[in-house]
Image: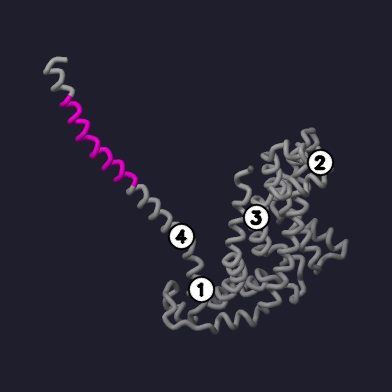
Amino acid sequence: MTTLEKDLVQARGARRSTRAPHRKHRTGLRRRTLRYACNALGISATVVFLYPVLLTISTALRKAADVAASPLGLPLHPTFANIATAFRNMDFARSVLNTLLITASATVIVVILGSLAAYPLARITASWSTWTYRLFLGGMAIPLFVGIAPLYITLRNMGLVNSYLGVILIEAGVNLPLAVFFYTSFVRSVPRELEEAAALDGCGALRTFGTTILPLLRPITGTLIMFVTLAVWNDLAVPLVFLQNPQQRTVMVNAYSYIGPHGFEPTTLFATAFLGALPLLVGFVFLQRLITEGITAGAVKG
């Protein structure tokens, strides 16, 4: 190699060595910018989602005159009179117990029947199984209001109007297609070798489902329970139509009763809405660890 060639090689190496720190600096700058942008986006999304909750609590703690003067103002002189009035007028304790009974019962029925129905639908490849699964999916696309009248006539003939059982059956039936969809998709991802191993140990179909498949459904069950709980707890149409006894009213029905034909009192309505959502908020705060573990458990099959 000549002297000129050596000089050229050394010059190229020098240029590369000077470019490397600049490239690292630009890469680090991009990463920091992306991280800051993601953090800003996350904070903005959090503020957007929390703003209605904060507005509800703020309005519930203010006097009617203050809200009329400044609808979006802060509770500079907070008062719990609105919450106490809503608590007393909506019979809060009884409403929560009624809602808990309906929600818990419907959720248990949905989880049991949905998992039992999804197991054969996921494993049997016959044409009737495919069409049955499609019928369940079709049930997710039918609005509840379409079937209100037929359901009311059916329950009236069965003597289940103004009964908790009738509302529980309707809520379970409405949410059952969602459970079948969730469970069927999950069971199809479970290896068949696990069931074959259980069959070699002498397990029948039901025992195989209970000992092998059901424990693997914990993550999807946690997600399904959250969906069904929110849907049943916040439902207004079914309890409003099928529970006409004031002693059987749910939280949402009592909250809706504060909306009159010509207007409503914001402080009382927002206090009622806050009380209606409070049990769910408390439950998720205290059970968030169990809910998170239930969702993430079994994510990696071993």
Place of residue 39 in the rendered image (x, y in percent of width and height, measured from the top left): 39, 54
Alpha-carbon neighbours of circle 1 within 10 Å: few (<14), some, or many (≥20)?
A: many
- What amino acid is found at the position of numbered circle 3 in the picture? Gly
CB-based contact (under 8 Å), mark 1 and mark 2: no
- What amino acid is found at the position of numbered circle 4 in the picture? Thr
Q: Which residues are magenta?
A: 10-31
Place of residue 36 in the rendered image (x, y in percent of width and height, measured from the top left): 35, 52
Q: Is residue 121 left or right of residue 261?
A: right
Residue tagged 2: 201
- What amino acid is found at the position of numbered circle 2 in the picture? Asp
Residue tagged 1: 57
Residue tagged 4: 46
The quadrant holding residue 4 is: top left
Which element type, helix, strand or loop, lies under badge 2?
Answer: loop
Alpha-carbon neighbours of circle 2 within 10 Å: few (<14), some, or many (≥20)?
A: few
Which element type, helix, strand or loop, lies under badge 3?
Answer: helix
Of circles 3 and 2, which is in front? 2
Residue tagged 3: 222
- Between the C-alphas of marks 2 and 4, the distance is 51 Å
Foreground pick, 291 / 62: 291
Q: Earlier in the sequence, mark 3 or mark 2?
A: 2
- Between the C-alphas of marks 1 and 2, the distance is 58 Å
Of circles 2 and 4, which is in front? 2
Q: Earlier in the sequence, mark 3 or mark 1?
A: 1
Alpha-carbon neighbours of circle 4 within 10 Å: few (<14), some, or many (≥20)?
A: few
Place of residue 183 in the rendered image (x, y in percent of width and height, measured from the top left): 70, 46
Name which residue lies at 65% across and 50% down: 220
Of circles 3 and 1, which is in front? 3
